[in-house]
Image: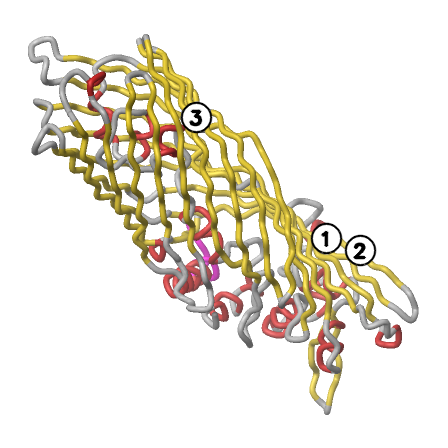
Amino acid sequence: MKQFLLIFSLLFCLKTFAQVPEDAIRYSWQPLNGSARFMATGGVMGSLGGEITAAYVNPAGLGLFKTGEFVFSPFYKQTKNKTNFRSSSTESEKNALQFGPMGVIIGIPHLNNSANSSSITFAFNKNASFNNYLHYRGMNNYSSFSEQFAEEFAKSNLSINEVLSSNSPLAYTSAPALYTYLMDTATINGFVQVKTAPEYLLDSGVALMQDMQKTTNGGIYEFAISYASNYEEKWLYGVTLGIPIINYKSNTIFTESDVSGDTSNGFNSFTHTDNFETYGTGVNLKLGVIYRPKPYIRLGLAVHTPNFMALKDTRTTTLTTALENPIETYTISSTTFTNDKPGESKYLFNMPWKAIISGSYVFREIENVKKQRAFISADLEYIRHRASRFFSNNENPTKSETGYYDQLNKVVKNEYKSVVNFRIGGELKFNVMMCRLGFAYYSNPYKDLAFKANNMRVSGGIGYRNNGYFIDLTYVHSVKKDVDLPYRLSDRANTFANTTQTQGNIYATFGLKF
């Protein structure tokens, strides 16, 4: 965790840069949401094809279409979080109605050769959802949220007047802390030191009550245009041009309190509120091929380029400090130090590339699909999380900007690793009815052995297809283990919360063939 010192030492010369390593993993460690059939079979689509979510996994699978299809997929998301922070457990939950893939597939049979065909697909999907509420609290005698302000100010070599100016370079951190008397300078043994009020309590052996509440909204959306070709029912090729859109909003409220009952130490509590938003769009390509050496065997390979994103962050913070003896309360907004405007940062971000290999076995694979009875399919997905990269979006970036992003990218490379994810699923068909089961495992993206993380999904569903109409229903139960860092310090290991997120999601897909 000491790698963060590389970034921290540069913060004093940057006004609005707010990107941190967690931004990288937030966007790349998100299992794909798809149609009810896709979700029921564990998310396998690397070699299976025949449905709209193939546009986001392996577009070659769209080459199986010789007719048209319209699809609409809503789902209901039920989320419960259980966190363990400083040996204290807390629970929270948030539910929401969401929308999965919707769009149209146009099959184009080749009149001169019935074994060849093509398809064009237009689809829109909410690939991932950020809707969540996380709450944890606990007693901490080890570190304080406010220490990051003192570290930053001490390393900046700026005067108090410079930091408190109307155009402050530390508008979201040290400036509010100085203004509200949460932090001050003191001469100790002839040396000037920067300390915060909670630090004095820690030095005297008093533990602090820390409370973290974080509400997030938004998602990763993607408009996809796909073309696929079927050659002699043996080779299928496909390409998707994706236009991803990121919309992420967070409201974080961190409160630190003295619960000792001692009013002589002068500190009661502080509350730091951070309103943050990221919005932007980009482009990517997904290339895929499926080979059928035998009519009942399908082998797939897909490669996804990085999402090349142009993003903008917007941020405002508020700090309230309550002091004792005498009782005084001070509140300040970051906009006081940014000419009454929210802070903005524009930058480029490349999400990691991925590769998928897959195999499927279709029982009774014959031309008349009504007589097919079942399939089983599995995907292996490789994602290079440590390859995420940030860049300045300015035509002539300053030396400070270039240095900041260089150091940030080094931290991303050092903190995250490449992973292999696994998915398996199958379907059993009874004339017009189908039953499906699936399982998926998403591996730990962190290098730090103290961070225990993974995501497992178990799913099952049914489907109905008759006279050109189809309806699919699916239930997905997922358990995601992760960590959440409320703040980062450069001089010691960082405290963090272990989180267990349980989701019970209900998916539905309605479709019409034409």
User: Dividing the picture into quarters, in which one does residue 377 lie?
Assistant: top left
What residue is drawn where x is 38% and y is 34%?
39
Q: Residue 148: image x %, image y %?
A: 62, 68
Looking at the image, do the residues carrying marks 1 and 2 touch, with CB atoms under 8 Å apart?
Answer: yes
Magenta region: which residues? 396-402
Q: Residue 511: image x %, image y %?
A: 38, 16
Q: Which residue is mark 3?
A: 473
Q: Nearer the viewer, residue 468 or 179?
A: 468
Q: Nearer the viewer, mark 1 or mark 3?
A: 3
Q: CA distance from mark 1 to mark 2?
A: 7 Å
Vertical comparison of 66 with 420: above or below: above
Q: Amino acid at mark 1?
A: Thr
Tell me, yes or no, if residue 395 can be seen here: no
Q: CA distance from mark 1 to mark 3?
A: 45 Å
Q: Which mark is residue 318?
A: 1
Q: Residue 350: image x %, image y %?
A: 37, 47
Q: Amino acid at mark 3?
A: Leu
Residue 347 on the magenta segment = no
Vertical comparison of 130 with 483: above or below: above
Horizontal side of 464 relative to 60 (left or right) equals right
Disc 3 secondary structure class:
strand
What residue is drawn where x is 55% and y is 63%?
11
Horizontal side of 77 relative to 330 (left or right) equals left
Residue 399 on the magenta segment = yes
Tell me, yes or no, if residue 332 can be seen here: yes
Q: Nearer the viewer, mark 2 or mark 3?
A: 3
What residue is drawn where x is 33% and y is 24%?
434
Q: Residue 172: image x %, image y %?
A: 65, 57
